[in-house]
Amino acid sequence: MLKSVLLRKALIIFVITTAIALAVLITSYTLLSKDKHITQKINELMPVANAAALLTTEKIANSLDYETYAYLCAEMADSVNSYIVFVETDYAFQYLSEPVNDPEFMRGLIRFIAENNEFFTGERYYSKHLEINNEIYVCAASHVYNESGTILGNIFIITERAKILSSISLSNYTIILSALIALPFAAVLTIAGATHALKPTKHLVLVAKEVSEGNYDAKANEKIKGEFGTIARAINTMTDRVSNMMRELRLEKRQLNQIIAGLSDGIVAINTQGKIMHYNPALMNMFGAVGVSTKEELVPHPEIWELFDAVLDTDEVRMTTYHTEDGRAIWITVSTIYDDENNCAGAVGLFKDATEMERLENMRREYIANISHEFRTPLTALRGLLEPLADDMIPDEETKHRYYNVMIEEVTRLSRLISDMLTISKLQSNALAFEIEPVNVSEKLKQLEVSLSTTAAKKNIEVEFDVQDNLIAMTDHDRLSQVLIILTDNAVKYSKSGGKVTVSAKYVKDFSHLITQPNVAVSNPSYNANKCKNKIIISVSDKGVGIPAMDLPRIFERFYTVSKSRTKGSTGLGLSIAQQILDAMDETLIVKSVEDKGSTFMITLTPFDPERDKKYLN
Ligand code: ADP
């Protein structure tokens, strides 16, 4: 019960107050009652003195014998615990009571009476301060008359003042004792009363404790009367305010965390001691971190953390490009974080994976270099032919004619280059519309057979078509033609005279075995075994020069040509265009080629499904 500090304090205050009250009581009682006691004693002594005076008169008249008289006087003196002395007017005295035998005392008494003559004149009957031999006494006096009424002397009843006052001490002891007996009861009552009075504090303490532990829903009882009610209301108002503030802070923090977590760039903040304060999943992914307890577990590259140290030391923003071992380029910007007083509170680093950007930038640079190169070749050739013609340095018509033919060839190559580049650019910017619809592949290949046979015949190349009937694919009519022309043109272009080009088309249930063979390249990297099912496959085979194994993986790149010498007039853009067209339709181009043996280019097409594509059925 006395766990309550308030209660303990109330009890201590009670004990101290009681002790002070008791001290004040005893002191004032002692002071005030001293005089009262002495007066009371004199009042008690007075009748005894009167009675003794009467007895003395009797004795002087010889009505009483001395023994009786002495006995009675002694008894009377005893009854009031005093001495009794009869002093005659001539200061002679009779011995009546025991201590009076002391001559010193008697001399002192006589001196006192002589000095205070009023006792015999009837002006004084008592003294509260009778000093004899350094002892203080109190006395009451009464005249002794003879029969004719003359004053013969005085009876003095004398008591030691100390004896009277000793009764006060007794009273004090009694008071203290009573107080000591009453104190425990009073203390119990005080505790009970205080406990009852402090009951609301228990409730308020509980509420305050709950609030301090973060439970802002805890409410103090506002109906409590008096000051505690005011405290309860103040606690509730305070709790509401803190609760609102905390809610806003939590909301802000959650939003900030969501923003940071949602960033595609990595972010990490450390304090001045180098301890991580925040980081986001993007950064974890960037460096493959799983559990993070130290900064080295998050980013296991000390060089990067040295950059943070430098920022903390110099207060300057630092930027760098960090190349990881696996070939990624990461742009890092580290800057200082400041606190409210503008002091450095840590550093924050922003990590951007610039691998793709750098790759694109390199590609762009390479592309421009390639274009310049591709343009320069025909232009240089043209200039080389035009200059002698312009200077009229070619006299014979036959040579001139040959020059003109070469020039026409170069200009055609230039215009093809430009048209191929335009197609690629349109494909990359999605500007080329695809109209996917059911296309009768069998019919289409029949039409192709006519034109291909004509061009192949010029090079003395045999053409064979092996096409299943009624193959209907969901594809874009024109784009498919474009791809087929690229493939068949190449087949003829890279076949030797007397060679053979075979075009076939059939429905294949599963062709996953095709993409796992050696000397095979697949244009669409998303093509795995699962995707190699239920397709129409058109293949264009030749027995021409083939493609060396080392060139196969790069065959779909823009401007990539196997060897300049064997590809006169080629741009290296055809297969790139075919790849991008097929990619856009989620199809793929598969190449199987062996150098000097020939190549087979296969394209996949999605067969028409009457169930899935019923909207195309009229
Ligand atoms: P182009 O044929 O205009 O040079 P392509 O992109 O169509 O450009 O072809 C790129 C390269 O692939 C060619 O330079 C050639 O070396 C090689 N190539 C393409 N088709 C064949 C094929 N059927 N036989 C051998 N090599 C080929």
Image (cartoon, rainbow, N blue to C red):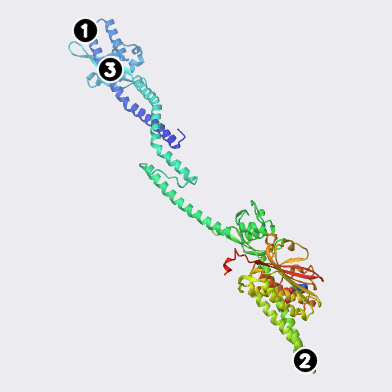
**Residues at badges 3 and 2 in contact (C-beta under 8 Å)?**
no
The image quadrant in which ligand 1 is located: bottom right
Q: Amino acid at mark 3?
A: Leu
Query: Residue at label 1?
Result: 61
Residue 614 visible within the image: yes
> In the drawing, what numbered circle is on residue 460?
none
Of 539 and 188, nearer the camera is 539
Query: Residue at label 3?
Result: 45
- Please tell me how crowded label 2 is: few (under 14), some (14-19), or many (20+) other residues with Cα within 10 Å: some
**Residue 226 screen position, x and y as percent:** 35, 42
Structural distance between the alpha carbons of marks 1 and 2? 199 Å
SS at mark 3 in the image: helix
Judge depth for marks 3 and 2 and give the one in front: 2
- Position of 398 with respect to 283 (left or right) is right
Residue 148 falls in image quadrant: top left
Q: Amino acid at mark 2?
A: Lys
**Residue 117 screen position, x and y as percent:** 26, 20
Q: Amino acid at mark 1?
A: Ala
Indicate whether 215 appears above or below 463: above
Query: Residue at label 2?
Result: 400
Residue 151 falls in image quadrant: top left
Residue 526 visible within the image: no
SS at mark 1 in the image: loop
Query: Residue at (22%, 10%) from the top-left corner?
Result: 57
Query: Residue at (44%, 48%) from the top-left corner?
Result: 239
Q: Earlier in the sequence, mark 1 or mark 2?
A: 1
**Residue 331 screen position, x and y as percent:** 65, 64
- Please tell me how crowded label 1 is: few (under 14), some (14-19), or many (20+) other residues with Cα within 10 Å: few
